[in-house]
Amino acid sequence: MSDNSSPREQLDLSPDEMRELGYRVVDRLVDHLETLPDQSAGRQARRKEMEEQFDEPLPTEGEDPIEVLEQATEEILSYAMRPNHPRFFGFIPSPSNFVSVMADALTSGFNPFLGMWMEAAGPSQIELTTIDWLRELCGLPDKAGGLFTSGGSAANLTALCAAREVMLAPDQVRDAVIYFSDQTHSSIDRALRILGFQPDQIRRLPSDDHFRLDLEALQTAISDDRAAGRHPFCVVANPGTTNTGAVDPLAQIADLCEREELWMHADGAYGTAAVLCEEGRAKLDGIGRAHSLSFDPHKWLFQPFEIGCVLTRNRRWLRDTFRVLPEYLEDIDMDEEEVNFADHGLQLTRNFRALKLWMSLKVFGASAFADAVQHGFDMARTAEQIIRDRPDWSLVTPAQMGILTFRYEPEDLPESSIESLNHQLVSAIFEDSWALTSSTKLRGSTVLRFCPINPRTTEDDIRETIDHFGKLARRCHRELDAASAGQQA
Ligand SMILES: *Cc1c(COP(=O)(O)O)cnc(C)c1O
């Protein structure tokens, strides 16, 4: 297939082969994205089925790259949910954009090393610039800074590690206490476990009627802990919970943290992107007063996985927390002017995540992003109205920050049957996968959770999806009736 110097042995393709493979990859991507609305929103399979299809011994000899590409796209990648599909409303969608996809290819091909400035001056500056755009959007002060991470989990871990370093002397760590609502994302629990905090140092406070952090409960818990000789040091606030989109009272939490001299961490992995549009900015008033902030561009900022971001209100805090200089990097250590991102977080080797965000913001402009974020607010309200208009559905939480929750509740059905009916419905939705949404539990009840933040989602998509879910729900209802009739017989 190529010249006779057996380039495969050097892991190379000839220039012609590279072009052919590359052009085909682009063709496959464009075919996929162009036909996305005509596809289902995902395809499920069990482990056994996948193992039978794909498990094979390590290939010792090479195969034709085009054939392998076809296998990857046609067979493997098709067995997955499609988080960028206009009828994917589950979990948190990732409706990315093509410019960023191409940027990821460039990043991978040029492969700059974003740990040390000396190794990648241009890319490091673009990360600084892009981070500074986000800092400004969030209303953090000039001296704030941050870096891109794999996602919100890593951003939360980085931020809480800085909070511990900055706020606590070594002998205070064991008595330190952190506070957040019961709606807070599990990645906070995981970060605290990794950081060595014990369960008795964590106050997971019952949220209020609107699933927000209850300020009174927070104040009481802090006072009680102080009275008991403990050391309150941090509050985690939610600028949009993953469950319902509820926004904690950020400005009041900031006031309280100021008064009590506590670190305020805002886990805005999902919600922070809302600062791009006016409606979101108003909802997130006070977010710029946080000491640290997580932000996931791979969610509501339309980037492909993985790109998260952590910001701290003083960029030195990250450096003070993470900088360790081994001998073999002394040559390329620089003064503070030039930022070595490896000194600011968990990773030494880092890829150029900033490029996709930078390129897509350059190509589309922030106003297109603002409109796209606003569309999520609008679509959630549209969905809420449709649910309100349908007799068999009942709204559980209204559209907030692009998320709403609801249940199928046909009249004259007891609560226990409604619970199992909605449970069945979620399984039916996954199995069918024409359109997708996921469930969550609120106050012990299973509810459907709908997050319509894809800018390509139309009102028709929402209406057709709810109609479709209605059909699946009626089928589940009939099956449930048949099962209980069978039991009685
Ligand atoms: C998604 C999410 C996370 C975790 O982020 P990953 O990017 O999945 O690691 C943390 N907090 C909130 C509020 C989230 O929505």
Image: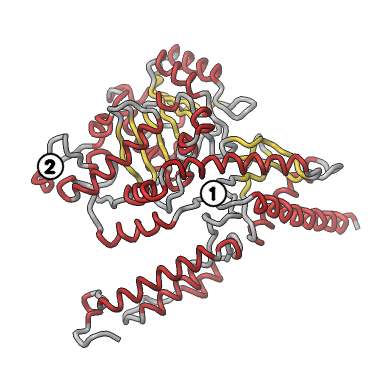
In the picture of the structure, the residue carrying the numbered disc 2 is 333
Specify the farthest residue to the left: 331
Q: Quadrant of the C terminus?
A: bottom right
Instruction: Give x and y (percent) for residue 367.
Output: 45, 41
Q: Do we see residue 189 in this rendering?
A: no
Residue nearest the viewer, comparing 201 with 277 = 277
Mark 2 CB near ligand 1 (8 Å cut) = no
- Total tally of numbered discs in the picture: 2
> Mark 1 belongs to which amino acid?
Pro
Q: Is residue 221 above or below residue 14?
A: above
Q: Quadrant of the N terminus?
A: bottom left
Instruction: Give x and y (percent) for residue 310.
Output: 36, 37
Instruction: Give x and y (percent) for residue 303.
Output: 43, 50
Q: Is residue 395 above or below residue 467?
A: above
> Mark 2 belongs to which amino acid?
Asp
Callout 2: helix, strand or loop? loop
Residue at x 25%, y 51% (from the top left corner) = 349
Q: Viewed as shown, does residue 157 lie left or right of 325?
A: right
Callout 1: helix, strand or loop? loop
In the picture of the structure, the residue carrying the numbered disc 1 is 455
Residue at x 10%, y 45% (from the top left corner) = 327
Residue at x 67%, y 44% (from the top left corner) = 383
Q: Is residue 364 above or below residue 11?
A: above
Residue at x 77%, y 41% (from the top left corner) = 389
Q: Is residue 109 above or below residue 379?
A: below
Answer with mark 2 or mark 1, whichever residue precedes in sequence. Answer: 2
Few, some or many C-alpha atoms within 10 Å of disc 2 (few <14, some 14-19, many ≥20)? some
Instruction: Give x and y (percent) for residue 156.
Output: 40, 37
Q: Do we see residue 216 in this rendering?
A: yes
Figure quadrant of residue 41: bottom right
Which colouring convention does the figure follow? Answer: secondary structure
Residue nearest the viewer, comparing 412 with 454 = 454
